[in-house]
């Protein structure tokens, strides 16, 4: 009878340890889901402000285009034509920014929904496990009571006393095991900051965009010299460029990490994407101003959106 009790208790302790491990895993999933939900909700709040501003920029650009078009309709001068071209360029940039912001909002919405789904599943499993633990504890209590009664009938007084002491110690150990709580530190998500390297990249990216904008704001040709310009990456497939004006072409495309061999027109370029940026959206400019010797400029789109 004693061997049977010890064997059962050992099995119970192993089962308890397993349940605690599972509980810790579920609690970790719950914590990570809560952090993920909070992270993407904060991102959505920020993006909503950016969306409002992007929409306002589009509305303003449309109004400027309408004014320029009206002036050109009244007097089809070269100056009015250039003003109309600049207005069209500004509207194109504003609309791309609006579309990019809408795309990022959709991505954040999807990620938040995934975390919410994981949170609900973990919460449900934790609740079910708590009920199961309660039922198991009650069953164990009944088992111990029945065992104590049988021992009292079959064992001699001295043996009975020894067995009851052992059972009491074992019950205390089992109860302590069942009541042990695995505390997990909830690590507050640090506010994202740019590294020194990323700050330098951000500075270079902003300077390059300012250069392109200044060029496009000038007297540039409306028609593209490279019609329907396409590009392709050895890792991320093909993509199409949009003509911004003059000799500047632009696209936005998510890129995988690794070394890309990018072909644009008849030229080849090498672009290395870090592992940490896998899947990030990149802004790619093709500058064909240097007598047909096109230059490729690429940078992570989010660098233009993250504050120092």
Image (cartoon, rainbow, N blue to C red):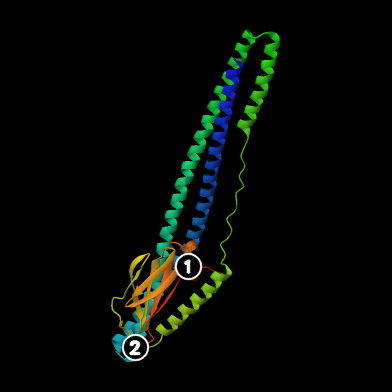
Tell me which residue sits at (59%, 58%) in the image. Answer: 190
Q: Is residue 284 left or right of residue 69?
A: right
Circle 1 sits in a helix, a strand or a loop, which is it?
Answer: helix
Q: Residues within 10 Å of mark 1 (few under 14, many from 20)?
A: few
Q: Position of residue 209 (x, y in %)?
A: 46, 78
Vertical relation: 27 (above or below) 245: above
Q: Is residue 187 left or right of residue 90?
A: right
Question: In the image, which disc is placed on residue 26?
Answer: none
Q: Position of residue 175 (x, y in %)?
A: 63, 28
- The answer to which of 295 and 137 lies nearer the viewer is 295
Question: In the image, which disc is placed on residue 80?
Answer: 2
Check the picture and name the quadrant holding the N terminus: top right
- The answer to which of 43 and 157 lies nearer the viewer is 157
How many marks can you see?
2
Circle 2 sits in a helix, a strand or a loop, which is it?
Answer: helix
Check the picture and name the quadrant holding the C terminus: bottom right
Q: Is residue 114 left or right of residue 176?
A: left
Q: Position of residue 56 (x, y in %)?
A: 43, 71
Asked whether residue 180 appears in the rendered view, the answer is yes
Q: Choose mark 2 or mark 1, whichever is in front.
A: 1
* Labels 2 and 1: the sequence-earlier one: 2
- The answer to which of 149 and 131 lies nearer the viewer is 149
Tell me which residue sits at (43%, 56%) in the image. Answer: 109
Q: Quickly name the residue at label 1.
A: 302
Q: Is residue 90 left or right of residue 303?
A: left
Gap in angstroms between the C-alphas marked 2 and 1: 35 Å
């Amino acid at each position: 009878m004693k061997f049977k009790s010890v064997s059962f208790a050992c099995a119970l302790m192993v089962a308890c340890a397993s349940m605690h491990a599972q509980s810790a895993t579920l609690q970790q999933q719950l914590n990570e889901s809560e952090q993920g939900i909070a992270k993407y909700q904060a991102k959505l709040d920020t993006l909503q402000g950016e969306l409002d501003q992007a929409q306002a920029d589009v509305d303003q650009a449309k109004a400027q285009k309408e004014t320029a078009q009206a002036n050109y309709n009244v007097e089809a001068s070269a100056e009015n034509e250039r003003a109309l071209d600049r207005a069209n360029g500004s509207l194109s940039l504003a609309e791309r920014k609006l579309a990019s912001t809408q795309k990022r909002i959709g991505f954040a919405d999807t990620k938040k929904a995934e975390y919410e789904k994981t949170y609900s599943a973990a919460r449900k499993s934790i609740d079910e496990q708590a009920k199961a633990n309660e039922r198991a504890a009650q069953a164990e209590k009944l088992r111990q009571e029945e065992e104590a009664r049988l021992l009292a009938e079959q064992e001699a007084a001295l043996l009975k006393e020894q067995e009851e002491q052992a059972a009491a110690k074992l019950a205390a150990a089992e109860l302590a095991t069942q009541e042990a709580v695995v505390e997990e530190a909830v690590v507050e998500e640090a506010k994202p900051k740019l590294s020194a390297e990323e700050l330098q990249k951000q500075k270079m990216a902003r300077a390059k965009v300012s250069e392109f904008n200044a060029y496009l704001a000038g007297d540039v040709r409306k028609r593209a010299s490279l019609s329907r310009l396409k590009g392709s990456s050895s890792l991320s497939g093909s993509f199409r460029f949009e003509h911004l004006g003059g000799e500047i072409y632009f696209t936005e495309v998510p890129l995988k990490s690794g070394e890309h061999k990018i072909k644009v027109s008849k030229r080849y370029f090498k672009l290395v994407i870090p592992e940490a940026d896998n899947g990030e959206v990149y802004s790619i400019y093709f500058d064909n101003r240097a007598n047909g010797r096109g230059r490729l400029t690429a940078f992570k789109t989010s660098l233009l959106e993250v504050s120092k």
